[in-house]
Amino acid sequence: MSTQPEQVLESNLVKQLSSLGHHPVTIKNENDLLANLKSQLEKHNQISLSDKEFKKILNHINKGNVFEKARILRDKMQFERDNGQSAYIEFVNQEHWCKNQFQVTHQVSMEGSYKNRYDVTILINGFPMVQIELKRRGLELKEAFNQINRYQRHSFGASHGLFQYVQVFVISNGVNTKYYANNRYYQSFKQTFYWADSENKNITQLDDFAKEFLEPCHIAKMITKYIVLNETEKVLMVLRPYQYYATESIIDRVKNSTKNGYIWHTTGSGKTLTSFKTSQILMKLPQVHKVVFVVDRKDLDYQTTKEFNAFSKGSIDGTDDTKALVKQFSDDTQLIVTTIQKLNTAISKQQYLAKMEKLQDKKVVFIFDECHRSQFGETHKKIKKFFNNHQMFGFTGTPIFVQNAIANESGKRTTKELFDDCLHKYVITDAIKDENVLKFSIEYIGRYKEKEGSKNEIDIEVEDIDKKELLESPKRIEKIVDYIIANHNRKTHNREFTAILCVSSIDTLINYYDLFYNKKLVGEHNLRLATIFSFTANEDDKDANGFIPDASLDIEGVTINQHSRDKLDEYIGHYNEFYNTKFSTQTSQLYYNYYNDIAKKVKERKIDILLVVNMFLTGFDSKTLNTLYADKNLKYHGLIQAFSRTNRILNEQKSQGNIVCFRNLKKFTDEAIALFSNKDAKEIILIEPYENYVERFNKAFSQLLVIAPTVKSVDNLPSEDEELEFIKAFRELMRLKNVLTSFADFQFTDLAMNEQSFEDYKSKYLDLHDKVKNDHCKEKVSILEDVDFELELIHRDEINVAYILRLLAKLTESNKDDQEKQKKAIVDLLSGEVKLRSKKELIENFINSNLIKVKDSEDLESKFESYWDEEKQKAFDEICKEEGLKPERLQEIIGDYIYTERKPIRDEIIDALEVKPKILEKKKIVDRVIERIMKFVETFIDGITG
């Protein structure tokens, strides 16, 4: 059999799960589910519940969203029994996770806005906790993922909402199998993971995956120990396999030895989550007195501080006040989260030693979130000297080996010398293979023997490392600034992403900043710039030894370079003026707040280019950053750390981390890759040259032509199967074009397909998307419904209604012959732009009926505004009349929806109806009204300003 039908896959899986210890049970609908929940809770708690008592439990568990339900699941419930006595009920045994009741069922039907039937469900104590969706072999996994998203919208929350207790989803087509945590509003296919063995070899076949991951004790352990409730984002996070093995290896070490150890997990693979989870588990071990989780103060931006404080209130306050830390050491706090700076003070300052000495013989475990901060060596020595019964574990993405060790006051120290054995390894090649981080696209800019006419060939020095005056000459810097201004939009997809420019010294940074700033004043660009640097000492990278020093954020009692400080204050002045803030370098706190605000604004894409010497090149995580401009000598761990700022996974549009080198770092890049993965890893870590992508695009275009030889032929595709083939073929072209456009040398003439053809086919692609989106026929589920159209590859912010109005103004000023051509171009543009398609008919109508009345292009905007308001009012009145809605209530609902971006709730709609609907009709009417409201906002309000 070439493809295995889903039913065969399903029954085989149910059989296998039964043999693993999940008791098979038949559950057809919610009534069966509730009856089963009651009997399983009774069995688990060794209790008998009356219907009245069970109803109390149902009321308790039917509260909140997925995140709040995850909390309820992990807490015991106190309730009053029928005889007046108080009792507790446990929903899941977290301490002895194997001692729960395990069941498996399949084809449970639930009815919400649609009736859905789910494939395979694992129940723990009667709660559906693992939902498995299967697709036949050969189908994309993304389709199963999108199907679950559909269920979440349509039926998981229906009635008692028991399917909102699902903690883990599993998707499989038999050959490939992935898992992920249940996050109703934050679901992204990028957050789905393969399970693996301890050597990072992925387990993809469904039967192998089931044997390892879905075995009752293991899945219960994952749910009870290895799901993190992220308090900041209010989402569930499940650990990936390498995070699980790292944590387990440290727990084993603490339980069975007194040795230290370190974890080598590549930058960007989620070390903080792993190290923090490890700390949480260790603190519950009876032999451990305290766990101290140590971070560097400069790694604590506003987000991580909030996250740590949510777990351990007040543990991080962004200051260096050590009193609170010493108090935590002496009270019953089990997990202390602190900074390396405070820890240093607590174990070395005389005033704290009396309180701290009581702990000298207690078992204290230290976890270092990043064990190669510059202050670490000193702290390491102090801990060893002060605590007699300590264990230390370090996490690092770039260990220190003999080759990249740097001598300091303690001599050359490798990670192994400091921490003993490496307990688990997950290197950059593993992370790229698993799609947990992106590849790098490195372009070398300067005088190289590149191909003729390359835009990357500009006349700047790249090799004369010793000739400081050449590298820092104003002429060279101006050429680089001009290159960045010319290519920044291309690199960042029209500023969908942000960039860092790192340079060799503060003096050079000042030259760069002043040049950028002056060019902005005369209108050569409108990039939003910011900078921060340390002015306590010179930050030059004299010998570029690969170590990026930690810049101090403390300015009291240290030697200050006044010129650097004055310049930074001038630049902070520009920042304050632009962002309406009040930062300065007057105090350490104000300077620290400025540092934090920059971190926040880069993440929010409110800064286009951040200029630095060393700051932000290590430890700073921003998914929205995709480009590093480097005019600085980088080596070994410093190079990998700096490059890794760009390769966090975000969406389809962010296909790689862009590294633009204005110095020849090729040899150092090769050496760093060899050291931190292996010498053959280049083709895994770096993306291919431009020419290879051109070749791949042309090949993909040929495949598209086989399916749809002309644009018109798309309309005549015989069935949804052929439409699906077209969607996949054109989507591949979009993905390749997305990578190609980030190369400075990209031009459409290099491709076999011309730009107009691409736009025409794109229009047809979007027509198919609209057809699927707007076809709400309940009886038949379209096979296209779960296909991911990856519309972020098409979205361009600069094309909005304001842009169309500018084109219309040009149209009114042109002669008759040109007008028809321009009209067609505008209509084509409306068809090809995702966010304007809902407005297409209205704008076309304005062009055909009203444009002729506009005599002066100056009046165009006000005429269009009047037309738009009129049409908006007509559409509003139409909804009120056809649906029987009170206009003032509908106005309020629309206002709330625009403000909160949250879908209107059912009760609001019912309240707005002139006549209350009958029970059987209620659901259908409410869903239809919500749909119309959202369509109204999308058409008349979204994208109208700007």
Image: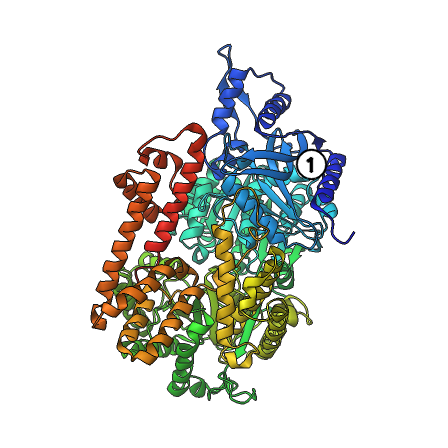
Asked whether residue 329 is in view, the answer is yes
Q: Is residue 428 above or below residue 36?
A: below
Q: Residue furthest top?
A: 83
Q: 853 or 564: which is nearer to us?
A: 853
Residue at 42% across / 76% down in the picture? Answer: 505
* The quarter of the displayed image where residue 363 is located: top right
Q: 859 or 905: which is nearer to us?
A: 859
Residue 471 screen position, x and y as percent? 45, 84
- Sort mark 1 into few (<14), some (14-19) or many (20+) by Cα contacts within 10 Å: many
* The quarter of the displayed image where residue 481 is located: bottom left
Circle 1: residue type? Pro
Q: Is residue 87 above or below residue 541?
A: above
Q: Is residue 707 left or right of residue 506?
A: right
Residue 829 screen position, x and y as percent? 41, 68
Residue wearing tag 1: 216
* The quarter of the displayed image where residue 850 is located: bottom left
Q: Is residue 767 left or right of residue 717?
A: left
Q: Is residue 115 left or right of residue 139?
A: left
Asked whether residue 645 is in view, the answer is no
Residue 647 screen position, x and y as percent? 53, 64
Q: On the rendered image, what quadrant is the C terminus found in?
A: bottom left
